[in-house]
């Protein structure tokens, strides 16, 4: 088992990344000059990554008269909240729909993932690996390959277009990643012996899950909830295929706000910030768990 | 036998709903799409359609527009994977030994992952403005300000397939490099310190230490990264949609072409494109999944 694999899916992955590196103790291979070069390079890359952030911020506060080519990279001549107001007016209903969609979808697929992950890691049955691969494949498919019949199925099941269809879709197609995250999590932190002794004591599956597994599942849930919330919030493909402007989520709203012939860049930028706010907040507050989800997405080492 | 079923039966029962759901919504619907792709359902009209075998696929692979989208995708994938691996690896190498403020660098390099590609597409659409010279906008204007005018270029709107698709790959690289950095960083930090010490005691130079000791340890991670990036690239849709709009032949990839085909209600052809996309992803992912499962069984 490689290191990444063992740490996958838990906050531990983040801990591994932030672990104090070995050579600071050894003090070798780092001269003052190489340290300076490294720092300069890092700062340059930092600038590269932050350039779009600068652009978004300054443009979103500019008045419509302040968008000449020459002044594009300058700070606003006159700061205004008008673009933000305009973007918010357009996006507000979409934001509410996205929230009412991402939260339940994240919770439902996490719960299913936890139960599946427990069985696949610690309550195995013959052929469990085949079932695991069968589930995992769903994570990789291009959703275009199911999109047309999915629409037909939703119509036939008479599920209301909009938030309800998207919740169902995201729950189902979120099961594979949640199952993977929890399977790796339980395989790492729950020793087999504990389960064995519980079984010897006559505890059934539900008892074992409720008494032993559930109480230590919090980090796993944080990881899957963040992961699912972020992917559902940021999804555009399902939104485009399954909903319309009057019932779609925020990515659809932003695409409409920033598309078309005459683009209001200031409002588009403000809109991009508004729609990114919830996921950015989650990232800033719970960053180390976010990384845990990323690591799990990497599957096996 | 009865006892064994009692031990593992409940577990199988827990997984049953998932297996049924995914059996229908993944495998069943793929079969349905495949079935549609074998018919002449070229309109939105309901009712029965005739089977035409693999005719739609035959048409696709002789059609310039589809072949163009495949070539675009190929170039995009190469540019995206190479770019992301280079940035990710360099960032990991720069951070791996620990620098003051490391967590700030890490958080900044990773943050684009939390943003939707539609939102980043809004900004990158602005940055990749094709105007040059006096009217230069976006990055071209920044180049002019920095006296780097020779860098000004029409981005995705002009030039060869390579420059076009590299312009599309740039925002994708911006968005995903942090992920690869995190993978490699975890890999570096997972290598036992004793390995480094032993190599240093043996008098290995810094370069040799990386080349012969550390990099070989990272090859499984590099493989994972390659497969993740490959399948992301094959599915890339939002970013292109947001930056160029869906109606640009120059930047059209199969995912976009499928959407455009569907807008014309040509269901059979749209399904055929989707199945081709699936086949490409499957070629990449199935060996990887098989390897994973076998690896698990050996444990």
Image (cartoon, coloured by chain):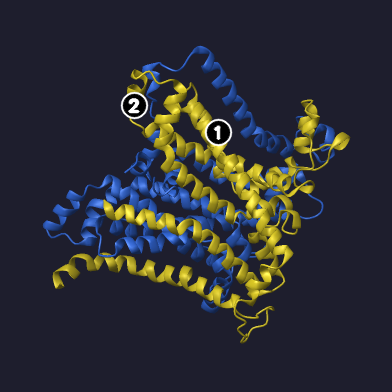
Chain colours: A blue, B yellow
**Relative horizontal placement of residue A17, taking residue B159 as reference (left or right):** left
Q: Nearer the viewer, residue A183 or B224?
A: B224
Q: Mark 2 or mark 1: name the one nearer the start of the chain.
A: 1
Q: Which residue matches tag 2?
A: B193
Residue highlighted by disc 1: B108
Foreground of the two, A93 or B140: B140
Locate the C terminus of chain A and report the quarter of the image it occupies. Answer: top left
- Judged left or right of residue A47, residue A16 is left
Chain that bears disc 2: B
Q: How far from the left and from the top, in percent, is residue A237?
A: 60, 59
Which chain is disc 1 placed on?
B
Q: Position of residue B93 (x, y in %)?
A: 49, 29
Residue B21 sits in quarter:
bottom left
Q: Is residue A267 left or right of residue B206?
A: right
Where is residue B98? Give x, y as percent: 45, 24
For label 1, the crowd category at 10 Å Cα-Cα, with few meaning under 14, some 14 to 19 and many 20 or more, is: some
Above or below, A51 relative to A139:
above
Label 2: how many residues lie within 10 Å, few (<14), some (14-19) or many (20+)? some
The image position of residue B78, as x and y in percent, is 61, 47
Q: Is residue A15 at least partly visible in the picture?
A: yes
- Residue appearing at x 64%, y 49% in the figure: B76
């Amino acid at each position: 088992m490689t290191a990444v694999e063992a740490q996958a899916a838990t906050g531990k992955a983040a801990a591994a990344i932030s672990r104090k590196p070995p050579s600071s103790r050894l003090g070798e291979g780092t001269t003052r000059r190489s340290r300076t070069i490294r720092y300069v390079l890092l700062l340059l890359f930092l600038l590269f990554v932050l350039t779009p952030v600068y652009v978004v911020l300054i443009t979103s506060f500019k008045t419509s008269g302040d968008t000449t080519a020459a002044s594009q990279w300058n700070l606003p001549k006159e700061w205004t909240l008008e673009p933000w107001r305009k973007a918010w007016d357009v996006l507000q209903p979409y934001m509410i729909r996205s929230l009412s969609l991402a939260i339940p979808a994240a919770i439902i697929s996490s719960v299913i993932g936890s139960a599946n992950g427990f069985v696949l890691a610690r309550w195995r049955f013959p052929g469990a690996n085949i079932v695991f691969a069968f589930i995992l494949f769903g994570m990789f498919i291009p959703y275009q390959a199911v999109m047309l019949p999915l629409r037909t199925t939703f119509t036939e099941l008479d599920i209301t277009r909009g938030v309800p269809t998207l919740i169902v879709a995201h729950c189902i197609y979120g099961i594979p990643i949640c199952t993977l995250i929890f399977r790796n999590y339980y395989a790492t932190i729950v020793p087999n012996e504990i389960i064995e002794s519980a079984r010897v004591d006559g505890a059934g599956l539900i008892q074992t899950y409720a008494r032993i597994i559930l109480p230590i599942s919090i980090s796993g849930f944080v990881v899957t909830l963040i992961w699912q919330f972020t992917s559902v919030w940021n999804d555009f493909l399902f939104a485009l295929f399954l909903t319309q402007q009057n019932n779609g989520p925020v990515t659809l709203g932003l695409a409409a706000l920033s598309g078309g012939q005459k683009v209001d860049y200031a409002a588009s930028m403000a809109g991009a910030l508004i729609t990114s706010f919830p996921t950015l907040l989650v990232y800033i507050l719970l960053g180390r768990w976010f990384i845990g989800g990323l690591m799990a997405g990497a599957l096996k080492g | 036998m009865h006892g064994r079923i009692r031990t593992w039966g409940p577990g199988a029962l827990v997984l049953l709903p998932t297996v049924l759901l995914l059996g229908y919504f993944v495998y069943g619907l793929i079969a349905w799409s495949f079935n549609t792709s074998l018919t002449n359902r070229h309109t939105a009209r309901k009712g029965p359609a005739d089977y035409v075998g693999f005719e739609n696929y035959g048409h696709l692979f002789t059609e310039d527009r589809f072949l163009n989208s495949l070539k675009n995708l190929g170039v995009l994938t190469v540019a995206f994977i190479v770019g992301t691996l280079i940035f990710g690896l360099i960032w990991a190498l720069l951070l791996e030994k620990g620098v003051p403020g490391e967590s700030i660098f890490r958080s900044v390099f990773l943050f684009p992952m939390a943003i939707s590609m539609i939102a980043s597409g809004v900004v990158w659409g602005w940055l990749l403005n094709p105007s040059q010279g006096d009217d230069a906008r976006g990055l071209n204007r920044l180049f002019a300000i920095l006296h780097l005018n020779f860098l000004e270029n029409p981005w995705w709107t002009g030039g060869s397939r390579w420059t076009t698709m590299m312009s599309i790959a740039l925002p994708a690289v911006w968005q995903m490099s942090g992920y690869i950095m995190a993978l490699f960083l975890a890999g570096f930090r997972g290598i036992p310190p004793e390995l480094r010490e032993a190599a240093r005691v043996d008098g290995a130079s810094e370069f040799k230490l990386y080349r012969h000791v550390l990099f070989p340890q990272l090859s499984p991670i590099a493989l994972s990264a390659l497969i993740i990036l490959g399948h992301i690239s094959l599915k890339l849709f939002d970013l292109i949609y947001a930056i160029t709009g869906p109606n640009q032949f120059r930047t059209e990839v199969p995912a976009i072409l499928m959407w455009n085909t569907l807008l014309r209600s040509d269901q059979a052809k749209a399904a055929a494109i989707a199945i081709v996309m699936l086949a490409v992803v499957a070629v990449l992912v199935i060996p990887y999944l098989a390897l994973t499962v076998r690896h698990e069984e050996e444990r």
